[in-house]
Amino acid sequence: MGKPTGFMEFERLEEGYEPVEKRLTHYKEFVQTLSDDNAKTQGARCMDCGIPFCNNGCPVNNIIPDWNDLVYRGNWKQALDVLHSTNNFPDFTGRICPAPCEAACTLGINAAPVGIKSIEHFIIDKGWEMGWVVPQPPKAKTGKKVAIVGSGPAGMAAAQQLARVGHDVTVFEKSSRIGGLLGFGIPDFKLNKSVIDRRVAQMEAEGVVFRTKVIVGDKAIPAGINNDATETVSAAQLKKDFDAVILAAGSEVPRDLPVPGREYKGVYAALEFLIPQNKEVQQGIKNPINVKGKHVVVIGGGDTGSDCVGTSYRHGAASVTQFELMPAPPEQEDKPLVWPYWPLKMRTSSSHKEGETVREFAVATKAFVDDGQGNVKALKAVRVEWKDGKMSEIAGSEFELPCDAAFLAMGFVNPVASLLDAFGVDKDGRGNAKATTDGEGCYRTNVDGVYAAGDVRRGQSLVVWAIREGRQAAREVDAFLMGTSALPR
């Protein structure tokens, strides 16, 4: 806890933001970390609640009250050590995690919850500033070799844990940079890629080998999924050369919208827009999609849709409209009903506030209309209502909207099947790698020595869940290779 009476004395303070008119001119991060004094004050709000539900609200079980108290007392280095004891990459989660821990905060029952995410952001930024985040190479090598397919947060977490106990770890990534969707999917204005690069440098110093532009498997992957690979490695070769393999390739196949006109130019899956934009910012490779002066419609109301909104405003879009199939959630959740679980409520991102975003709820897209030359110029939609979990269209509610570019941001359905097929890994009913998290042999697939963790196993999820699964899978692999493991679960 922080100060015993702090929650009564101090109000929640949000992190600062660069003014909209300034941040729209660049793709750099614009969230301002708390000052030392403000961080102490926010840490003081952590109350002696008896049972810290925030710990279990956080998928990696961060020991939140402890580091809140340490921040309140100005013990930055010790706070960093406690934070790192459960989370390899708080610099990722402190920026892009939606903070389910805050939804579970006891103070949040009848007041603004403790600003846990902002304090986490402060701790790790302070750690890098002071030079406290350093490589932790193993004291001895085991002689065991582990291959990890995929370099997103699950793969990175597993790699770091295994390298630190002495295994030789090689990470294979088909993109031209490390990070998975953190590297190329999430815009730089939410996560500057130098944040990933400094972690990669730390891990390389700990012995992790990263191999980019390498695709694992001998089958083609679906069109529209980023693939910078210039080299192929077979699943059989990995199983031969390594003592264990962890599949952590994420869930990359986007949910499509099979309506008339889907094939028109100007209708894209969201990552067909976001990934090239990241490459333009990071590598100077021009994004072939430019929406300056265009009417943009984003179909999907989640984080990926929000990223399309923010990127469109930076291009100079004439207008941005965002569709969501579900009805508008309440402005405020019913806390006695939902606490300490993640509530359904209206969420407005910083991107929505960067322009006059029109947000339409309970709307279904019916068709795209072209200009006679195959370029989208409008879309047809209808309003819907939901009853007993079933959707029906409202008669007479059809409408047409100008649309020069449409981005489909409706989530991801499953990992690339060819990767799982290459290893002979069984799939669950949703097409994910089949591996349990219960009992003996957690994260182990039906193939001996092959494990699966993160979105490739659980389906589309949060960065913090990926880190958790990567850490836990690392422990299972370590135990498989050594007979026992001292790694935390």
Image (cartoon, grey):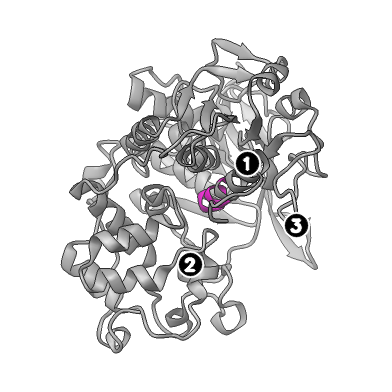
**Does residue 237 appear to the left or right of 144 in the view shown?**
right
What secondary structure is found at the residue carrying circle 2? helix
Residue closer to the observer: 8 or 72: 72
Tag 3 residue: 439
Tag 2 residue: 101
Residue closer to the observer: 478 or 26: 478
Compared with residue 326, is residue 399 higher up or lower down, i.e. above or below? above
The residue type indicated by label 2 comes to Cys
Q: x, y percentage for residue 197?
A: 35, 33
Q: x, y percentage for residue 353?
A: 36, 54
Tag 1 residue: 482
What secondary structure is found at the residue carrying circle 3? loop
Q: Which residue is rendered at x = 63% and y = 35% of the image?
A: 246
Residue closer to the observer: 313 or 401: 313
The residue type indicated by label 1 comes to Met
Quarter holding residue 372: top right
Point out the stretch of residues depicted in magenta.
462-470
Quarter holding residue 74: bottom left
Residue projecting furthest to the top: 230
* Of the two numbered discs 1 and 2 in the rendering, the one whose residue sits closer to the viewer: 1
**Does residue 104 appear to the left or right of 85 in the view shown?**
right
Question: Of the residues under marks 3 and 1, which one precedes in the sequence?
Answer: 3
Q: Which residue is rendered at x = 57% and y = 31% of the image?
A: 150
Question: Of the residues under marks 1 and 2, which one precedes in the sequence?
Answer: 2
| Residue 325 among those drawn in magenta | no
